[in-house]
Structure formats: C-alpha cells, structure tokens
Image: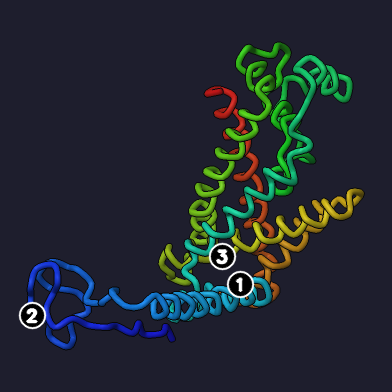
Amino acid sequence: MPMAKKRRKFVQCPNCGYTFEEVNNYCPNCGQENHDLNVPVKHLVEEFFESTLHYDTKFWRTLRYLITRPGYLTEKFNLGQRASYVPPFRLYVFVSIFFFTAIALFASDGLVISDVDSAKAQLEATNPEAAGRVMQADSVVRPWVGLTLKDSADVIINQEVDNKFRSFVKNQEQSRQKLLKNISFMMFVLMPFFGLILYLFFRSQGRNYVEHLMFSVHFHTFVFLLIMFAILLEVVFSSLDANGWVFLISMVYLFFALRHVYKESYLRTAVKLIPIGLTYLVSLIILFVATVGVSVLFS
C-alpha cells in the first residue's frame, strides 16, 4: 500500500484565503496544496528520505518481479493491483534511458567504417548479388545488442551509393546519434504494434487492448534489461558474443509470460509462440529497415 503523505495543514489557504476543512488536501478555490513547507530544513530532509526510500522499495520490488516472474506484473496490472508497483510506462522510460545510454557508451565500436567505397566493396566481395537487396536475416538481430553503420549500409547500399548515404557515413557521430534516436522511437512504435499482435492471437479471450499493451511494455522492458546485461558481459569478456543467448532467453521469457497471463496450456502456448515470434520478428525487420532509411534520407 502507498504511504500516506504527512501533511502540515493550514487553517486558511495562504494563496487565496479560503478557510479549509479537515478533509481538504488542496484548496477547492485555487488548487494550491494544503501543506506547509515553511519548516526547519531537518523536517524537509526527513520527508525527502522517507518518500525516496519508499519509492526505492517499490522500484526494486517491481524490478525483481519483472526479471524473475514473467507475466506477473502484467497480471497484477490487469487485476487492478497497481499501487505496490512502478507503473509500466514509467518503468519502461526509466529502463530505456539506461538502455540507450549503454548502447551509446559501450556498443559503439562498430559504428565506424572508413568510407563508403570500402563498405560497398566488402559487401560485394562477400556476395555480389547482395548489393541490390536489403539486409540479410543474420544481421537483423544486431539492433538488439549493438548497432553498426555497417549493418545500416547493408540496408541502403545498391549498385550506386547516393550522396545522402555518403553524407550519413561521413558524419559518423552525428549519424550514430540520429540512428539511436530514431531506433528509440521505433521501439516505442513497436510496443503498441506487438500489443496488437497479442490482441489478434488472443482475441477469443475478450480482453481489452490495454491488457495486451501492458504485456508488451513489460516484455520490452525486460528485453532492454537483458540486452544491457549482455552488453556489460561483452565489455568485460571481449571475446563473448551474447546475441544468441539474448534471443533464446527472450523467447523463453516470452513463453512463460504468455503462459502466466493468458492461462492457456503449455502446448497451446508453445504453438502460438511460433507465429507470434515470427510476426514480431518480421515487424522488427521492416521497422528497422524503414528507420535506417529515414535516418539516411533526412541526414
């Protein structure tokens, strides 16, 4: 249960002079809070730490359940039991800030290529036919664990490299920041779309779309935490490639979260996981290609 705020109430509103009743936490006349802040600093410091420690307790409890109990927070939200946990979107925003910061700081080594011609030459030497196609499947998972301009080049390069792409590659730092910013927006668009996918696959349960959206928010928040952990492992162990493990753990987590929230049998959940996962992956590919294209087009 949330901790009630201890108020030092006025008899009259200092802003408009309204005479308060005992139940008034805010002035009905002007809206100002009925709480006296003109007290010794000691009291303000005590209040600050009291509220901060309470929030910290709620945050760590929410984080623990998110990681160790797939689907638990979504179920609690859908049941209306929300006061003891950090709201889903607030949690997502908080985690995503650290997620994109971690990518910018620790997963940016591959964001540098020497020039467009060398990138094109490398692509054509590997597969001459690839120059006229978009990204190959084995490079699609890269945006989850570390973005590179070489990956972006695979999306944009054709037989002739236009001026916009040359400018995009030339301005390495500016292009990297633009791409990361657009990727963050892409993920924010992907969440409601994944909620729509779940809505379609579980429409027979008669759930509101918001319930599926909250599932999507919690799932993506977990994936961000997982990728951050993988990035840190790769920083410590430079020879480690955690891409495969990130994908595998994400799918296992998704399976148990679906099973917990939608209450279907293990077999039925497993059968649905395959088309849900494939639909999500195709959506991710399309959005990522579009995001890179937009980043280059408006560079």
**Residue with the mark numbered 3:** 218
CA gap, disc 2 and disc 3: 45 Å
Residue at left offset 12%, top offset 73% = 28
Residue at left offset 50%, top offset 47% = 189
* Mark 2: few/some/many CA within 10 Å (<14, 14-19, 20+): some
177 is higher (above) or lower (below) than 17: above
Dot in front, 2 or 1:
2
Question: Residue 130 is drawn in which quadrant?
Answer: top right
Q: Tag 2's secondary structure?
A: loop
Residue at left offset 66%, top offset 65% = 254
Dot in front, 2 or 3:
2
Choose the circle earlier in sequence order: 1 or 3: 1
Q: Label 3 is placed on what type of residue?
A: His
Q: Does the residue at mark 1 contact the one at mark 3 (Cβ under 8 Å)?
A: no
Question: Do we see residue 268 in this rendering?
Answer: no
Choose the circle earlier in sequence order: 2 or 3: 2
**On-image quarter of the C terminus:** top right
Q: Label 1 is placed on what type of residue?
A: Leu
Residue at left offset 13%, top offset 74% = 13
**Residue 159 picture location, percent across and down:** 73, 13
Mark seen at residue 133: none
Q: Nearer the viewer, residue 189 or 285?
A: 189
**Residue 272 picture location, percent across and down:** 64, 63
**On-image quarter of the N terminus:** bottom left
**Residue with the mark numbered 2:** 19
**Residue with the mark numbered 1:** 63
Q: Label 2 is placed on what type of residue?
A: Thr
Q: Is residue 123 left or right of residue 279?
A: right
Question: Residue 256 is drawn in which quadrant?
Answer: bottom right
**Residue 208 picture location, percent across and down:** 41, 67
* Mark 1: few/some/many CA within 10 Å (<14, 14-19, 20+): some
Q: How is the image coloured?
A: rainbow
